[in-house]
Structures are given as structure tokens and as C-alpha cells.
Image (cartoon, grey):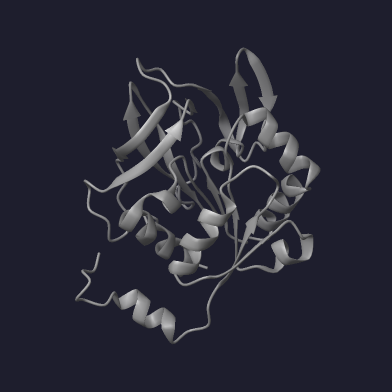
Amino acid sequence: MSTPDTPDASAVTSSSAPSKRVVVFDYGFGNVRSAERALARAGADVEITRDYDKAMAADGLLVPGVGAFAACMKGLREARGDWIVGRRLAGGRPVLGICVGMQILFERGIEHGVETEGLDEWPGSVEPLQADIVPHMGWNTVEAPAGSKLFAGLDADARFYFVHSYAVHDWSLETGNPAMRSPLVTWSTHGKPFVAAVENGALWATQFHPEKSGDAGAQLLTNWIGTL
């Protein structure tokens, strides 16, 4: 990352290029204003909306999420967000999920013994963290795989801000086809290793909050915007 005295090359480039249009999907469950400000600082033209046409036309769609898995899924379906996400991905249009906005991309969520169907973009269950202290709240490092675009330019000891009591502990999706790139999975550890981020074609997601993660989070959002 750049220092205050050294302009970031990507920022210089973005200032001379048209801003990418990003919609923060507003379905009632997420820190939409924080996400809006962070994306704007990273150089995007941002709008908070649940309007179908705007969400479909944007260069990138950010799906936030806080609270319970079941409540987020209910709100997303009521706002037709499940359909919008599916339609965008079918057309190869970028989507970024954050926190519970990442969790609902998996097959199911299990909270207090109750199972709720997710969007099933990825196999796996969102289950309670296996740690002595829950929730996992605060700063933590991650282990990003080689070739990650999401974490490009970030040091291995970069720290990100987490607030969650549930996570995915097992990853099973592989392409099985050497001609197709397998998803890139980033891990973190709180008690037991859990999935901290995924890069899978047009669909990327983070368990942590990049909009609350200072310079590291700003670089990560800049990286995502740069792929739009």
C-alpha cells in the first residue's frame, strides 16, 4: 500500500477513467452507509437501492448483511435480491457479499438448531464458531491463497475486522476440471479455521467487514472495483 507521500498508482489511473457504478443492495440488513462511504473512497460511483433495473445495470453489486442468517434470507427474498443475485451471476456480472451477505451464499445456515436454506451458490453449512470466545469480534489476520486478486498488494500480516458468531468451517467445492480454475479460498482462525473470503468467477465474498478494516479494507475494495 502507498504512504501519504506516495500516490497509489491505481488511484491515479482511476481518476482518469470513468468511475465504476456499484449498487449497495438495500434489503434492510447491512451497514449500507458504511459500505457506501468506503466504496466511494475507493473510487466507485455508489448508489444504495433495491431497484431491480439499477441493481442489474450496475458494474458491481455489493450485498451486505448483519444479524441472523434466517432474517437476512427472508429480507433478501422479499426484496427479490435472491433473484437479482442469481440473474447477475448467470450473466457473469460481479457480486460481492460481506459478512452475513457472504454466509447466505452457501447452501444452508444452522442457528440454534434451526436450518435455513441459503442461496446455494456454494455447498456448505454456516454453523456456530467452534471457539472459547464467541462472538469473534475484532481484528484478525487471514491466509490468502497464491494468485488472489482480492488481496493483491496486501501484506501477509494485514488485519481485518470481524464480527460474527457463525462461519463455514469446511470447503468442498472443486471444479474437477483442469481447464477450469477452482475457487480461491482464504482462511482465518478463531478456535478452528473458517472460510474468511472466496473468489469464484464473478462471485466474491468476505466474512470480515472491509468497510471497517482501515487501509487494508480500502485496498481490498479498490482491488474488487478494479476488476469490474
Q: Is residue 183 visible?
A: no
x then y, percent, for residue 182: 45, 46
Please name the residue shown 30% across and 38% down the image.
140
Determine the image quadrant of residue 7.
bottom left
Image mark count = 0
Hey, which residue is sitting farthest top in the picture?
113
Q: Is residue 34 visible?
A: yes
Please name the residue shown 21% across and 69% down the image.
3
The one of 163 and 190 positioned closer to us in this rendering: 163
x then y, percent, for residue 147: 33, 55
Residue 143 relative to residue 220: left or right: left
The one of 218 and 201 positioned closer to us in this rendering: 218
x then y, percent, for residue 158: 26, 48
Please name the residue shown 62% across and 12% down the image.
113
Determine the image quadrant of residue 186.
top left
Please name the residue shown 78% across and 60% down the image.
52
x then y, percent, for residue 1: 25, 64
Up/down of 76 relative to 117, above or below = below
